[in-house]
Amino acid sequence: MIMETVSGLSELRKRAAEQFESQGYPTTRNEEWRFTNIAPIVKAQFPVAAPVVAGPSLKDALEADPELIEAHLGRYASTADNPFVALNTAQFEDGAFVQVPANTVLPEPIDIEFKALQGRTTHPRTLIVVGPNSQVQIIERYSGAGKYFTNAVTEIVVGENSIVEHIKLNEESREAFHVATIQARLGRNANFKQHNVTLGGALVRNDINAVLSTGSEGTVNGFYFANGKQHIDNHTAIDHAEAYAASHELYKGILDGHSTAVFNGKIYVRKDAQKTDAKQTNKNLVLSENASINTKPELQILADDVRCTHGATVGQLDQEALFYLQARGINKDEARNLLIYAFARDVIERMGVERIRQYLEKALFEVLTHKSFAESA
Amino acid sequence: MAKSPILEIKDLHAKAGDKEILRGINLTIYPGEVHAIMGPNGSGKSTLSQVIAGRDLYEATKGEIIYEGEDLLELDPEERAQKGIFLAFQYPVEIPGVSNLYFLKAALNAIRKQKGEPEVDAMEFFNLVRQKMSIMEMDESLLNRAVNTGFSGGEKKRNEIFQMAVLEPRLALLDETDSGLDIDALKVVSSGVNALRSPDRAILVITHYQRLLNHIVPDFVHVLAEGRIVKSGGKELALALEESGYAGLEEFAEIAR
């Protein structure tokens, strides 16, 4: 273990281990995990290994400047509320570290890639610290082959008046378990966009949490496409801790085959967070009779001068639209794909990195034309 | 040489669920002809156009539809469209996320493919689209908007006829294209349709009102009541109907029964 030389950090890890011991793995009796049974993860008991990371390594950064890491790591993602965060904090061996100094605009996005190891548990740990008045785009990608468990935690600090866009791509194998928490802290007048895309994984749980300071703007968008027996659970929590902050949330999902999905969107508006403007939308397109989604907004509003809206829809493919396309000569399969694609495009187009948009459009097209319908037929 | 019909409908019966809507339609249309079908609400006008286009909400239980010598009921809706049948929808469907331009190009290429022609060249397509848009007095910005999404009622109907102009069908079915249009839009839509009249194309106009037929003058008028054609005649029939209304039709329906 590499961290033992850093006393503060080893203390943190020790406490996290204790917290995990006392909490244990969550069960479906826990409201937060009601629709997601993680028993298969516990049962698999894959031994822990260091993650394979392509990008700026956390381990290297920790060796070079332990005080810098220690000043931030573990200070945002709570080990008390989420046992998987505690487990990651106690056991992580590597991950990624991105630091953007003050007054710096990075012209190119930073890529971080985690390639999973078959038959292993990895705890990728990512820390992103962006100073004031800076700008950066970061792409975090997870992939692998076969059976394994990825338990990732990403902490993002967005400095005052900074602009950060973070894209997470889950392209794990169809047999993989993937649990991840992204915890963001926004400084005053900061602008943070998070796009959470899930295409892979047998059992997936994402917790996307953001705490907003005065005048900041947080966008959390997501797209999930599940088929076969995939289970994809997205929990989001937007904490309007201070006044004059805005949050926008759009999660869109497509469910085919025997897949199941969960969307739970929490919005907290604290007592002093006047003039909060929060909007949350979850839309689901269910293509198969055997697929299902549980969607739930949870709003807790303690301030009185705020605007909060939320809405959720679950629908099938529009038969009228399908016929309209067919009546213009477009083949039924193609028409169906076009409608599905149009549904998803809305959320993909909101991403600010063109090569990712193109990549996802292509990936989606491939999923549509090759896999999903054969599986659901 | 005698021309062969584009469309022959013989004793067509169709139902939606358990409800029989068409009860023995007979209609023959030759190239170059414009036919109008009139009738009160619920007489089966729109059902007829939907059955010809292939909507699966309706099931043809008896009779046949022969299109250019081929059994139409055996074909999928897209095959019908590829072979030159065009339905201008009474209620054009909004499709968010699919641009009008992309949609139209996909439709045109599907038809060209069926004809064994290569995909349309980008420049050629653009010129074609611009030309047809100016005929329909449509704003070019509509091209980049999602299909019918946020269009006004008039814009949707113009968009239908615009699509028809680009796709150049052999048989056009206009399902209450006049409903909800103001005078200006009615003129534009009508002149768009008239511009498509040609010796090798047939048009079937379905309408509740005689007014449209002042602009698109039909060769034949048929009156539909309770799922049957109860009277056929020339364009003067439409005028006679305008005066007497549909009130006397039940009588016809009785006789036809």
Image: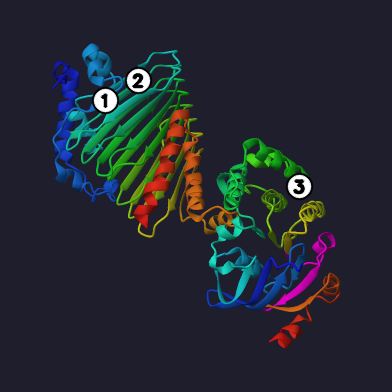
| Residue B167 versus residue B47 in the image, above or below | above
Name the residue tied to disc 3. B136
Name the amino acid, label 1. Answer: Val
Q: Residues within 10 Å of mark 1 (few under 14, many from 20)?
A: some
Residues at marks 2 and 3, common chain? no
**How far is mark 1 from mark 3, CA to CA?**
58 Å
Name the residue tied to disc 2. A129
Name the amino acid, label 3. Answer: Met
Locate residue A203: give its quadrant: top left
- The residue segment tinted magenta is B205-227
> Is residue A123 left or right of A158 when viewed as pictured?
left
**Percent x, y of residue A11:** 16, 23
**How far is mark 2 from mark 3, CA to CA?**
56 Å
**Percent x, y of residue B110:** 57, 50
Q: Secondary structure at mark 1?
A: strand
**How far is mark 1 from mark 2, CA to CA?**
18 Å
Residue at 18 percent across and 42 percent down: it is: A25
Marks 3 and 2: in contact by CB < 8 Å? no
Residue at 43 percent across and 31 percent down: it is: A356
Name the amino acid, label 2. Answer: Val
> Is residue B240 left or right of A303 when viewed as pictured?
right
For marks 1 and 2, give the one nearer the viewer: 1
Name the residue tied to disc 1. A53
**Percent x, y of residue A230:** 30, 48
| Residue A50 versus residue A223 in the image, above or below | above
Q: Secondary structure at mark 3?
A: loop
